[in-house]
Amino acid sequence: MRAYIPSYQLTTPTSLADVLSLLANEPGIWKPFAGGTDLMVLLEAGRLDHRNYVNIWQLAELRGIEVNNDHVTLGALTTYTDVQTHPVLRTEFPMLCQAAGETGGLAVQNRGTLGGNIVNASPAADSPPALLAYDAEVELVSTQGSRWLPYQGFHTGYKQMLIRPDELLTRIRLPRNTTGATHYYRKVGTRKAQAISKVCFAGVARTNSGHVGDVRIAVGSVAPIVVRCVQTENALKDQSPDAATVKSAQATLRREISPIDDIRSTANYRLQVALNLLADFVATLKS
Amino acid sequence: MNKSEVSFKVNGRQHRVEVFPMARLLDVLREELQLTGTKEGCGEGECGACTVNIDGRIVNSCLVPVAQVDGSEITTIEGVAGEAELHAVQQAFIEHGGAQCGICTPGMVLAAIDLLERNPKPTEADIRTALAGNLCRCTGYMKIFESVVKAIE
């Protein structure tokens, strides 16, 4: 049933400092509201349980993509459209651009934000596998100061994460260490466009004289959180990307993920697709 | 909660409305401003029937709380045609059978115009990508696709 709109509050402070004060003065009472592409769906379905929101969409401090020698730093309100059109992201972080292009239609891409995608904490979200594989870090800011955390480990369980009620996720930082790497991103849904993932696989790797070098893999929709598959990475490292390596890495991946049956797919299908995508990823490392 | 004042332009005309801040822009356009050209389909950002243009970007107006358009400039389907003639995209939809029941049409037209403003010479793939967020249950899409191709010509 549709929500009763008058029971919701959406307040619009004019500065980041005012937002942080509100979050600090009444912790847990106010939650940030960015592009609305997830929260408004829950609202219309009558399933938006929290009532008081602080609008952050208007905060220029949370926009923009900055590039220096070591990092690309994205404001939390960077939209999927912003991601896809940025030249450095297109060259060095193509999986993030691909994820952005496969999230909803254009109208959603114009509104949905990376920060929102992270704190909405869906295990089926499209950008987190790419962010994890790229070793992203996230900045959390409160009136007490700011701290950077590795994105890996930020989500601790289904919809659980290392952010305090008085903190706002303000920036996402990607280390520029992908030169010469192979990037493999594949989202498998019911159809190619406008579908939520059944499985989403992101892998980035380098090869040195026929062997797998640095490799990072993250998979979505196969566990309560998007999983960085460190053991599977270790099964590939320093190996030749051949059939025996694929088999051993698949056996590891099978233990590292825990897909379930739900409205979008089955555990068996998800497991098989994840294993197939791993094989496909390793095949791209042969040439 | 109390209503609050939100000001924005729609199709070049300034409006000031007293609304609940979480009200959907879609509902404010249709019910407060009587601009019923914008349609509701799914209400969850899948179908694109409620597409409007805010500050140069198309959005699903069912996913935008009205508090977020304070100070914005919005174009709805009612603002697309000129004084005396339809927009080339609208004319092409009429001439080439791009509209049947009409529910998806406002969103399709706004998405097509947005594409042509960003990219006056789109490829076939560009057109399909630009319209991917707009669902149609009547046409089978080809007539819509062909209408956009004709509008480009």
Image (tube, coloured by chain):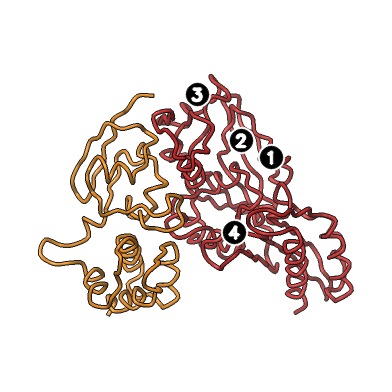
Q: Is residue A64 visible?
A: yes
Tell me, yes or no, whether the two marked residues, 4 and 2, touch with CB atoms within 8 Å.
no
Same chain shared by disc 1 and disc 2: yes
Q: Residue at x 73, y 68 (%)?
A: A277
Q: Nearer the viewer, mark 1 or mark 4?
A: 4
Compared with B15, A239 (above or below) is below
Specify the amino acid type for callout 4. Leu
Q: Earlier in the sequence, mark 1 or mark 4?
A: 4
Amino acid carrying mark 3 in the image: Leu
Could you tell me residue A234's position as x and y percent?
A: 86, 59
Q: Quadrant of residue A120?
A: top right
Q: Under tag 1, what secondary structure?
A: strand
- Provide the residue designation for mark 1: A149
Q: Label 2 amino acid? A: Leu
- Element carrying mark 4: helix
Q: Earlier in the sequence, mark 3 or mark 1?
A: 3
Decide: few, some or many residues near mark 3? Use Cα within 10 Å; few <14, some 14-19, many ≥20.
some
Residue ID for mark 4: A96
Give the amino acid type for the residue marked by disc 1 in the picture.
Leu
Q: Which residue is mark 3?
A: A22
Chain seen in red: A
Q: Is residue A192 above or below residue B24?
A: below
Asked whether A235 or A238 is in front, the reply is A235
Query: Which residue is farthest front?
Result: A1
- Work out whether residue A62 can be spotted: no
- The residue shown at (53%, 38%) is A47
Q: Are marks 1 and 2 in contact (CB under 8 Å)?
A: yes
Disc 4 sits on a residue from what chain?
Answer: A
Q: Whole-Å distance between the Cαs marked 4 and 2?
A: 21 Å
Determine which residue is flagged by label 2.
Answer: A140
Asked if the residue under mark 4 is in contact with the one under mark 3, i.e. CB atoms within 8 Å, the reply is no
